[in-house]
Amino acid sequence: MKQFEPARINDQYSLTLNETGNVALSKVGVGIVDHMSYYYTRNDLPLFICRHEPSVNLRTIHDVMVQLDAQLAEMVGCGCLMVGGQNVAINQHII
């Protein structure tokens, strides 16, 4: 699978989407501090970010989510996204 660039929140925090549809929040000098299922709980992502970095602004959250959405779409398209041991692209009906 293509390795995607982490979506940067600021100079301390970034989010990384993996092939199981989970997003990991990393902090410089610490590593992964939290993770969640981006595929199923996208609407909670702003709260997830703000819980760790309260000063982040809405524009940054929007930009991060757009970047992760694009990565998710590309992963589904290439068959790289596995959820529950199943390839998500297999379940998509192509018309």
Image (spheres, helix red, strand yellow):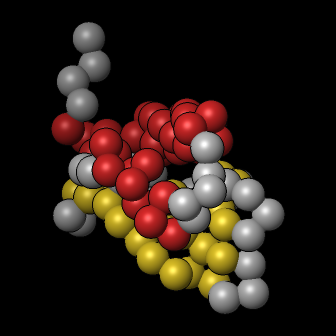
Q: Is residue 30 left or right of residue 24?
A: right
Q: Farthest front residue?
A: 55
> In the picture, which quadrant includes the C terminus?
top left
User: Where on the picture, by quarter, is residue 34?
Assistant: bottom left
User: Where on the picture, by quarter, is residue 6?
Assistant: bottom right
* Visible residue check, residue 22: no
Q: Is residue 55 left or right of residue 80?
A: right
Above-or-below relation of 62 to 29: above
> In the picture, which quadrant includes the N terminus?
bottom right
* Visible residue check, residue 11: yes
* Nearer to the camera, 24 or 4: 24
* Nearer to the camera, 50 or 42: 50
Picture residue at 20% right of the left edge, 38% below the top:
91
Q: Is residue 1 left or right of residue 42?
A: right
Q: Farthest right residue?
A: 11
**Residue 79 percent coordinates (x, y):** 41, 45
**Residue 58 percent coordinates (x, y):** 56, 38
Picture residue at 31% right of the left edge, 43% below the top:
43
**Residue 22 percent coordinates (x, y):** 39, 63
Picture residue at 43% right of the left edge, 49% below the top:
46
Q: How many labels were placed on the picture?
A: 0
Above-or-below relation of 80 to 70: below
**Residue 7 percent coordinates (x, y):** 65, 52
